[in-house]
């Protein structure tokens, strides 16, 4: 018998009510009048089944369960819990006494951690009604054992949220007065600092994602995406762009590449893994346990430790678009946002000391905001730091607020607990009014020593560098999420949703009025390609209306429709998606317009057939 002890079904509910009806066992738990009925508003309902196998360790089981539940509560931004005994999650039930003991201890553990906890009585048939939130985190399951490793359970770290205004003064999140234009910042504070519940519903961007062939891979593990021809083009362009953007920071950067699998018995890997917590994606091979990397840290640090470094070579950066893995819970997964396998354009910058890291960090922060503003969005960010670092570097935070053009949400964490002294989480507020972390920036003062990365200073002495972690635009899938969510915002504003022209799978589609004009269309296509514009040709034997509709569903920025009249006048009829207009323009003028919109961005040739008649039929919604 495995030591499975407690199975949990966790439902984030708008409303939950129960009423005890009659005995379900011969001697149920006593039922005082106040316990005959119970209710919960906007909280977490914990359906709990205690199994055989670990009945002698209710304390350990309940402690591990409390930590696991508390992690979920932190995601949901609520502290209200209802523990509901539920015998239907297993057929191997514990006897009454250890089951009640485990549930009582769980109730106490959660109460001691400051949560509002109620518990339904054990051993009674009960009627209940529940209204679930319906968001991606609203239905989760857990299996908890008494032997669960502490590294697999995220312990709650006590922290304190404060709002810093643009002058550097600190305010309580409960009493801070918001000014004009702070709606998104207020939403961040409410959900992160004040723990107000998240809204439910299916995100609108999911429909958009399917149009470009972004889907879950049903033949794989949960949380694995697949990319069709169009979305593969998008992700390749984003990878190129991430590589391009980091060089604007103004330091030497070396591209590297390596493996994604690391031995957990290697000391620095084990130590870093303990800091990471419960999201490790582990794999057993040849009687050894490996962890799949959750960023490029392991590979880049392992490589740089073998290099000969001098103060003269610092600062410099190492970069890789790293396939990364995190064991996200199945109920948390969200296409293009929360994945088990994703692409992280990971940059690590090695600096002589903390002072130099702060100076370069200012430039990194500016680049991060510059990039999100290019897509007409604003980040609302959480600044995780220690009080001592904040007090010693207050000018840095005031400068970061100047870049943000709004107050900062600070989260003060215990001294010496993390390997970083500053960890910024850059969030957008999405269409469902939920903070969504797109990227991060960290000043790391611990990992150089952990991995034995060192350099020789001016005096010939050995020193450990400070390391900045960042991706600037964020994970590739998450940046694409931001683009798609921005398209949702366009639609809400009465505009046609679209991607920026440079990252659209094709810039222009050529549609001849008749089959006889396909050869002329090929000539137009070739001139576009010669100018470095990604274009295709709809040569299918279909109606004009159907072909235009297909181009619209594919969000093609420029749709070129031509017939004999356009060929003679040399003025093409072009539908522009951004402004929804139909214009008359020459081909050179159109090429100039598209080139101006894609200037400064990466370009790739089309990687799938440019004639639509040669493509398999894939769905458009």
Image: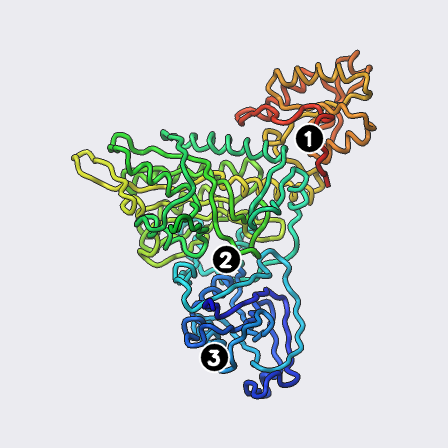
Per the image, label 2 sits on a secondary structure element best described as: helix
Element under label 3?
helix
Residue 306 as seen in the image, left or right of residue 485: left
219 and 501: which is toward the camera: 219
Task: Give the vertical position of 567 relative to 50 (above or below).
Answer: above
**Separation (CA) of disc 2 from disc 1:** 38 Å
Sequence order check: which comes first, mark 2 or mark 3? 3
Q: Which mark is residue 386?
A: none
Give left or right: position of 245 versus 88: left
Q: Which residue is mark 3?
A: 98
Q: Which residue is mark 2?
A: 192
Q: Residue at x 78, y 29 (%)?
A: 547
Mark 3 surroundings within 10 Å by alpha-carbon count, few (fewer than 14), some (14 through 19), many (20 or more): some
The residue under label 1 is: 556
Q: Residue furthest top?
A: 568
Q: Are marks 2 and 1 in contact (CB under 8 Å)?
A: no
Label 1 residue SS: loop
């Amino acid at each position: 018998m495995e030591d499975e002890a407690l199975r949990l079904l966790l439902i984030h509910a708008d409303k939950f009510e129960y009423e005890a009806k009659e005995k379900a066992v011969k001697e149920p738990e006593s039922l005082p009048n106040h316990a005959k009925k119970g209710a919960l508003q906007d909280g977490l309902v914990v359906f709990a089944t205690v199994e055989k196998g670990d009945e002698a360790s209710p304390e350990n089981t309940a402690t591990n369960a409390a930590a696991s539940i508390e992690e979920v509560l932190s995601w949901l931004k609520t502290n209200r819990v209802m523990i509901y005994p539920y015998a239907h999650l297993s057929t191997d039930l514990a006897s009454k006494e250890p089951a009640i003991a485990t549930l009582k201890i769980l109730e106490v553990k959660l109460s001691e951690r400051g949560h509002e906890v109620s518990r339904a009585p054990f051993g009674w048939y009960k009627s209940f009604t529940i209204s679930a939130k319906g968001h991606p985190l609203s239905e989760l399951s857990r299996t908890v054992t008494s032997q669960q490793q502490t590294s697999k359970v995220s312990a709650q770290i006590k922290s304190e949220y404060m709002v810093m205004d643009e002058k550097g003064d600190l305010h309580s999140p409960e009493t801070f007065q918001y000014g004009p234009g702070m709606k998104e910042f207020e939403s961040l504070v409410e959900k992160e600092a004040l723990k107000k519940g998240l809204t439910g519903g299916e995100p609108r961007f999911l429909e958009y994602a399917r149009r470009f062939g972004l889907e879950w891979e049903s033949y794989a593990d949960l949380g694995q995406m697949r990319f069709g021809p169009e979305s593969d083009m998008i992700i390749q362009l984003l990878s190129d762009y991430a590589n391009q953007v980091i060089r604007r920071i103004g330091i030497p950067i070396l591209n590297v590449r390596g493996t994604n699998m690391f031995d957990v018995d290697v000391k620095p890997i084990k130590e870093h893994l303990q800091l990471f917590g419960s999201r490790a994606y582990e794999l057993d091979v040849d009687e050894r346990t490996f962890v799949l990397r959750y960023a490029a840290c392991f590979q880049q640090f392992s490589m740089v430790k073998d290099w000969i470094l001098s103060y003269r070579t610092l600062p410099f950066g190492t970069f890789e678009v790293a396939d990364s893995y995190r064991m996200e819970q199945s109920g948390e997964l969200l296409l293009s946002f929360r994945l088990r396998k994703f692409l992280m354009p990971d940059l690590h910058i090695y600096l002589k000391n903390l002072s130099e890291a702060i100076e370069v960090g200012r430039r990194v922060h500016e680049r991060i905001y510059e990039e999100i503003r290019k897509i007409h969005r604003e980040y609302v960010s959480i600044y995780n730091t220690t009080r001592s670092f904040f007090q010693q570097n207050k000018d840095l935070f005031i400068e970061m607020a100047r870049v943000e053009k709004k107050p900062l949400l600070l989260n003060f964490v215990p001294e010496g607990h993390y390997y970083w002294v500053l960890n910024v989480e850059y969030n957008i507020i999405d269409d469902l009014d939920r903070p969504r972390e797109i990227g991060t920036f960290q000043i790391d003062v611990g990992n150089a020593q952990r991995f034995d990365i060192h350099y020789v200073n001016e005096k010939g002495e050995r020193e450990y560098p400070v390391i900045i972690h960042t991706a600037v635009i964020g994970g590739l899938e998450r940046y694409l999420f931001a683009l798609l969510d921005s398209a949702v915002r366009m639609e809400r504003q009465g505009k046609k949703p679209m991607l920026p022209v440079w990252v659209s799978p094709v810039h222009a589609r050529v549609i001849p009025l008749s089959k006889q004009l396909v050869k002329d269309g090929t000539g137009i296509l070739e001139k576009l390609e010669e100018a470095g514009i990604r274009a295709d040709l709809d040569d299918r034997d279909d109606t004009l209306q159907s072909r235009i509709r297909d181009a619209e569903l594919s969000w093609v920025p420029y749709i070129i429709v031509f017939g004999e009249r356009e060929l003679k006048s040399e003025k093409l009829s072009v539908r522009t998606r951004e402004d929804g207009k139909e214009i008359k323009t020459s081909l050179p003028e159109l090429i100039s317009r598209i080139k101006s919109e894609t200037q400064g961005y990466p370009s790739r040739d089309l990687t799938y057939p440019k004639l639509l008649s040669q493509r398999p039929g894939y769905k458009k919604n």
